[in-house]
Image (cartoon, rainbow, N blue to C red):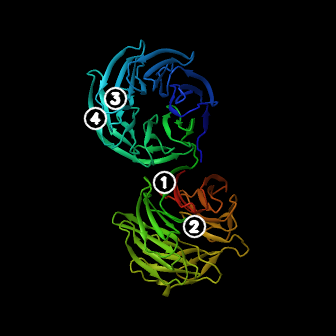
Amino acid sequence: MDASIETLNGHTDSVLAVAWSSDNTRVASGSDDNTIKLWDTQVAKCLSTLSGHAQSVTSVAWSPDKSRLASASSDHTVKIWNPDSQQCLLTLEGHADAVVSVVWSPDGARLASASFDRTIKVWNAANGKLLMTLEGHTAEVRSVAWSAEGGLASASADATVKIWDTVLQDCSRTLKGHFKSVMAVAWSPDGTQLASGSMDASAKIWNPETGEATATFTGHENGVTSVSWSRNGSRLASASLDSTMKIWNVETKVCVSTLNGHTDAVNSVAWCKSTTHVASASADKEVKIWDVNTGEPVLALTLKGHESGVNSVSWSSDGKEIASGSYDNTVKIWDASTGECLTTLKGHTDSIWGVACAPYWKPGNKRVASASYDKTVRIWDAETGQCLHILQGHTKSVMTVAWDRGGKMLASGSYDNTVRIWDTQTAECLGSIFTLDHQEPGAVTSVAWSNDSKQILSANDTLKIWDLSTFEAKEKPQGDKSDPRWARWSPDGTRIASAGYDKNVRIWDSKLSQCLLSLEGHTDWVFCVDWSPDQTQVVSASSDKTAKIWHAGSGKCLSTIKHDDQVIAVAWCQTSSRIVTGGEDRTVRVWNV
């Protein structure tokens, strides 16, 4: 899914660098085709092409007053251009190898350049005179950055970041923590933090005063080539060889979105300083412009590891972990921030159709329940992977499982047309006290507890609300033909959302006496539905390979999320604006909405 708002085509080879003008009306790009292109981002038009370098243009930088443009090249030179007249004003010669980064000083009086010759050079931008050469790196210097206060930092293939005193012309601090080449470095807008990106597939935030790494962002599947700060310093964008960019919340250290659309390595990323737009340059020969505040769901993580389709997902109550169940007979526990698989729960002898994280979730007390075609329900320790209880009693495949709000009971639904209640501490089946025997043919595919644990909502081609004190059931109107397979109460218990084989989602009153809305748009069966924390929206998962987000008041479809195959499971995090989906394509995907 290409989430970019503009694609700028014109380069004939890999695009290596991108930079916004200070007034944010133009973007400059440098390419392996030896040219620089200037773009009007409002109309997606190439304004001019600057030719003069003999080899690849590796870096571009606008002067603070936007009257000049600097470029660095593999031809060992830096050039300064008048972007309006397209005239080359100066050529700076002195490096003994490719120049891969160039940056202006805050006052526009000097330029700093970084080279494969292991040096940083500082130049007078008015006359091109070499002012100093900074030496100390033991491998190629890949990036250089100047802070608003005048601090100079560099990143190198020697796996370090160095901070330089340009008065003493000496290295004042070396930052160590990456274990592969550091490809990029960038100062925060206020100059109090440094960001770096490395071939070790991570980005780091540093305190330049202490040299301490205060945050490490992992999630990319290949090296990080570029980093850029948002205008207020609250977000960091990272570009990677994995063809994606990620947007990170610097304070929470969480990836808030992943930008997909490029088809090859992303070599450079630059954040516009006056809008929510980000520009990127890629080996696919394209420059793209992105709006990171479009309101559209953005894929944050793709979790891979299941060997077959994923048909059940559940958030932990703190929103930090995700459980997924699969046809491969396993349950996996994932870190919702990094995408790391923390634990794989093995023991079931057939497909898993239901997973549910316990309502209490803290270190040393993390429990997950799973329902399986092997006719059992299991309760697991999510940290150790140990199976704590095997709940036996159903005579056919178990399709669904749900904890009550207090975490003391479980409800399970089965192909044997029953709902069973279990004591989670003793593993005792409370079915001897109360067993729900549906008369209709077909599986019980969904169960849900009311907030007070006094009622259970079940779906098996019909909807029923069971009063656990009287054993009596309320059922949806007999004339309704929706054939529901899944249902969930709204967080406040005043409405019910159901999904079924008729391709629609329905919103009901809390007593099932009236259908309030029918949400139409899916083109195949709807397997699952869930509510947003503020209960203004619902999300549905369908066999048509999509999940849809709907306004629960108007019934309007707000957005559509796509998988590569049927989307069988969906769950809305109740502590943040994130959705998790699971599908036949064997993936679990986390979306920011």
Q: Amino acid at mark 1?
A: Ser
Whether residue 120 is situated above or below residue 125 in the rendered picture: below
- Classify mark 1: helix, strand or loop: loop
Residue type (three-letter) at the residue carrying disc 2 = Arg
Locate residue 205 relative to residue 402 in the image: left or right: left
Foreground mark, 4 or 2, reads: 4
- The first of marks 3 and 1 along the sequence is 3
Residue 284: x, y in percent?
56, 38
Q: Give the residue type that dot 4 points to.
A: Thr
**Residue 290, percent across and down?**
56, 39
Badge 2 element: strand
Residue placed under numbered mark 4 in the picture: 174
Please identify, in this view, whether the residue under mark 4 or under mark 3 is nearer the observer.
3
Whole-number angstrom distance, CA of label 2 to CA of label 1: 19 Å
Q: Crowding near pointer 1: few (<14 within 10 Å), some, many (20+)?
A: few
Answer few, some or many: residues within 10 Å of disc 4's Cα (few below 14, many 20 plus, some between 14 and 19): some
Circle 4/circle 3 CB separation < 8 Å: no
Q: From the image, tell me which residue sits under label 2.
A: 488
